[in-house]
Image (spheres, helix red, strand yellow):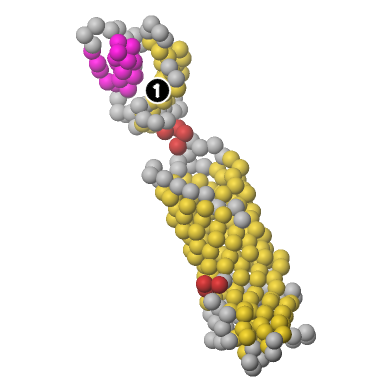
């Protein structure tokens, strides 16, 4: 108890405070700092670090003092002061929250559903069957402002399906453009879908709160390297499967995404204003997606 009292006296005097104990403990090298902007106290084992930033007449002031508790007393082991910087204690290490290290990250597995925008009237894409999956992004995360706001850029793989389960299908005959039209009369309909594979490059700005919430905004550049069409149905007891891998997807598209999360799970909305297919060769439509983000 005596050691803790002495430690508190030392820390208070480091930031301009005052304390007195019944044992008349002595404090040496007292420094009085008027109106510090920020004070941090960090505990690591038996060592406490007091950091003070800014003071009344010098916002660039910095003072750091390390105090170590031994079995018999409290000793000051290291002290630094200067005209640049300063932080305070008795909170959980704020420097770990405010001064994050730039790092390589693997995060944000996304699973969602898509609906089409601006499509022809007979193109009835079912949102409940139109899944999209994006692998976790491998990228670089940095904290340029020494706050809880980070900037990140990376790369991921994305698969998007636009699927119709009604009476219309995607039709692509050799030498002709893609159209949307009906199945053969009497067909037992299964599905007709377009699938697009992309290399996605998300560029995001993310902010984390003290209560483990986070939100982010940004853009995603998609390099759409492959797309295909598949239609399946039955007719007169026979199964039919029609496929085509030359449907002229738009090579590069840009999406806008916003997300809100808590700890390792979140929700995202993504709007894709660019046309999924080259409208010269097929139906013109864009997409809107919603889904969940994991870790």
Give the residues in magenta.
1-20
Answer yes or no: is residue 282 visible: no
Residue 152, x across and y down, in percent: 56, 49
Where residue 241 sits, quadrant-wise, is bottom right
Element carrying mark 1: strand
Residue 32, x across and y down, in percent: 31, 19
Q: Is 35 drawn above or below residue 1 in the view shown?
A: below
**Which residue is located at x 73 percent, y 77 percent?**
243
**Which residue is located at x 69 percent, y 86 percent?**
237
Is 11 included in the stretch rendered in magenta? yes
Is 241 included in the stretch rendered in magenta? no
Residue occupying the far bottom of the picture: 185
Residue 290, x across and y down, in percent: 49, 65
Q: Name the residue under label 1.
A: 50
Residue 18, x across and y down, in percent: 25, 17
Q: How crowded is mark 1: few (under 14 residues within 10 Å), some or many (20 or more)?
A: many
Foreground residue among 23 and 153: 23
19 lies left or right of 192: left
């Amino acid at each position: 108890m005596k050691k803790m009292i002495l430690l508190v006296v030392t820390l208070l005097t480091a930031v301009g405070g005052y304390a007195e104990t019944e044992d008349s403990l002595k404090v040496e090298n007292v420094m009085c700092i008027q109106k510090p902007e920020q004070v941090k106290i960090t505990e690591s084992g038996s060592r406490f670090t007091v950091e003070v930033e800014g003071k009344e007449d010098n916002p660039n002031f910095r003072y750091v003092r390390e105090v170590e508790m031994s079995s018999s007393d409290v000793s000051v082991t290291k002290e630094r002061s200067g005209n640049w910087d300063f932080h305070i204690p008795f909170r959980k290490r704020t420097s770990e929250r405010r001064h994050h290290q730039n790092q390589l990250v693997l995060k944000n597995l996304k699973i969602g559903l898509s609906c089409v925008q601006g499509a022809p009237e007979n193109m009835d894409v079912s949102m409940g069957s139109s899944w999209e999956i994006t692998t976790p992004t491998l990228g670089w995360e940095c904290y340029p402002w020494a706050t809880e706001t980070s900037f990140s850029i990376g790369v991921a793989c994305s698969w998007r399906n636009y699927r119709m389960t009604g009476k219309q299908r995607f039709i692509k005959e050799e030498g002709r453009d893609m159209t949307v039209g009906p199945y053969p009369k009497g067909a037992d309909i299964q599905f007709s879908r377009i699938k697009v594979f992309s290399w996605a490059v998300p560029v995001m700005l993310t902010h984390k709160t003290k209560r483990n919430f986070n939100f982010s905004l940004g853009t995603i550049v998609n390099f759409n390297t492959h797309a295909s069409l598949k239609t399946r149905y039955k007719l007169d007891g026979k199964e039919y499967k029609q496929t085509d891998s030359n449907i002229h997807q738009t090579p590069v598209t840009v999406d806008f995404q916003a997300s809100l999360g808590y700890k390792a799970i979140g929700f995202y909305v993504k709007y894709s204003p660019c046309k999924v297919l080259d409208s010269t060769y097929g139906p013109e439509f864009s997409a809107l997606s919603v889904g969940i983000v994991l870790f």
